[in-house]
Image (tube, rainbow, N blue to C red):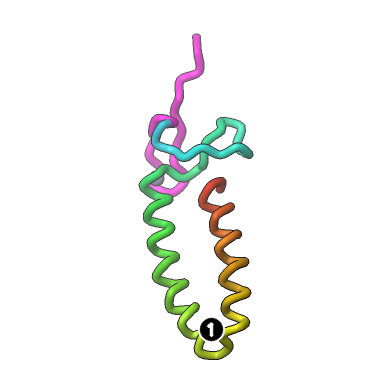
Amino acid sequence: MTMTGGRRCYKCETIKPLDDFHACRRDPLGRQKLCKLCVKAYAHDNRDRLAAWAREAYRRDPDYRREVNRKWADKQKEAMSCR
Ligand SMILES: [Zn+2]
């Protein structure tokens, strides 16, 4: 028997086919632990929080913010591509 492709999203706790998960090289199954819908929701939630934080940081120190923003973008890219 071949392995059936499916995994339980650790956020919405729904078992979904692997096609509903983004690829992740570091995972044994080769897929993220969050389904695509949850990844989308997560990104959306974080965008709101970050937008508020970034506005505040920028007001305090534009140069610092630019630097941090770049680092954050790299980190996010990694987090979203592989959780
Ligand atoms: Zn999910």
Residue placed most toward the observer, 28 or 80: 80
Above or below, 35 relative to 71: above
Q: Is residue 80 magenta?
A: no
The location of residue 31, given as percent across then percent down, is 52, 36
Q: Which residue is mark 1?
A: 57
Above or below, 83 relative to 57: above
The location of residue 51, given as percent across then percent down, is 43, 74
Residue extent of the magenta highlight: 1-18
From the viewer's perspective, tell me whether residue 55 is left or right of residue 64. Answer: left
Above or below, 32 relative to 40: above
User: What's the residue type where badge 1 is placed?
Assistant: Ala
Above or below, 55 relative to 23: below
The location of residue 27, given as percent across then percent down, is 60, 37
Q: Is residue 7 magenta?
A: yes
Q: Quadrant of ligand 1?
A: top left
Tell me the crowding category of disc 1: few under 14, some 14 to 19, or many 20 or more residues within 10 angstroms, Cα based.
some
Question: What secondary structure is found at the residue carrying circle 1?
Answer: helix
From the viewer's perspective, tell me whether residue 57 is left or right of residue 67. Answer: left
The residue sitting at the bottom extreme is 60
The location of residue 40, given as percent across then percent down, is 38, 52
Q: What is the chief secondary structure element of the magenta stretch?
A: loop
Residue at image position (44%, 72%) is 49
Residue at image position (51%, 51%) is 80
Residue placed most toward the observer, 51 or 29: 51
Residue at image position (48%, 78%) is 53
Choose top left, top right, bottom left or bottom right for residue 8. top left
Question: How many numbered marks does the figure carry?
Answer: 1
Residue at image position (44%, 41%) is 9
